[in-house]
Amino acid sequence: MKEFPGIPINVDLKVEAAALAVSTLRRLGAEEQVILASFRSSTLRRVRALGYRGTTSLGRSEVARLLSLPALAQRGPLACPGRAAQLPLSLAQPWIVSRCHALGLRVDYWTVNDPAQARVFAALDPARIVPALR
């Protein structure tokens, strides 16, 4: 994080490492720079329950709710707890991006390694396009 000050970093928690991730990022003072993501909604609930102050993504069940319920039903007490919708390429559709933006969610697409494909997704106005690090 010292190498990339001010640049948001996305960490996808593949295993149940919520407590370790939160405590490490808190100790480093990096919560505001790191978006914690996971397919597992249970992992993200744990991250949030630990008081993580940074941004979290939506888990799989939260993305399903985002896509299936009317936008009006997803406000107030029913609002998704995450602030970032990190979506696979299969969900790169204008109505999905519009819904996310209407709900105050940033949109990130992963994994995009093809420059031509990145230009197509950039036209949808996501916050970020995430390439694979090799």
Image (cartoon, rainbow, N blue to C red):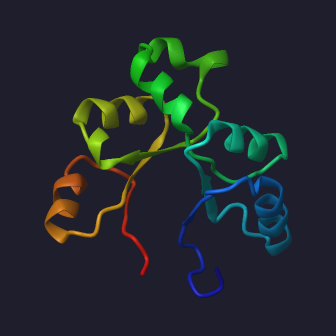
Q: Where 115 sits versus 91, above or below? A: below
Q: Nearer the viewer, residue 7 or 27?
A: 27
Q: Can you give x and y, in whole percent of width and height, for residue 20 in the image? A: 82, 62
| Residue reaching furthest to the bottom | 3
Q: 134 or 8: nearer the eye?
A: 134
Q: Which residue shows up at 56% across the image and 82% down it? A: 4
> Looking at the image, which residue is at 13% across and 66% down?
116
Q: Quadrant of residue 78?
A: top right
Rendered residue at 80%/74% (across/down): 28
What is the quadrant of the N terminus in the image?
bottom right
- The image quadrant where one finds the C terminus is bottom left
Quadrant of res 61: top right
Q: Is residue 77 left or right of residue 57?
A: right
Q: Whole-percent x and y of residue 106?
A: 46, 46
Task: Indicate the position of residue 26 as horizontal and vertical percent values.
Answer: 82, 65
**x then y, percent, for residue 95:** 27, 29
Q: Is residue 80 above or below residue 77?
A: below
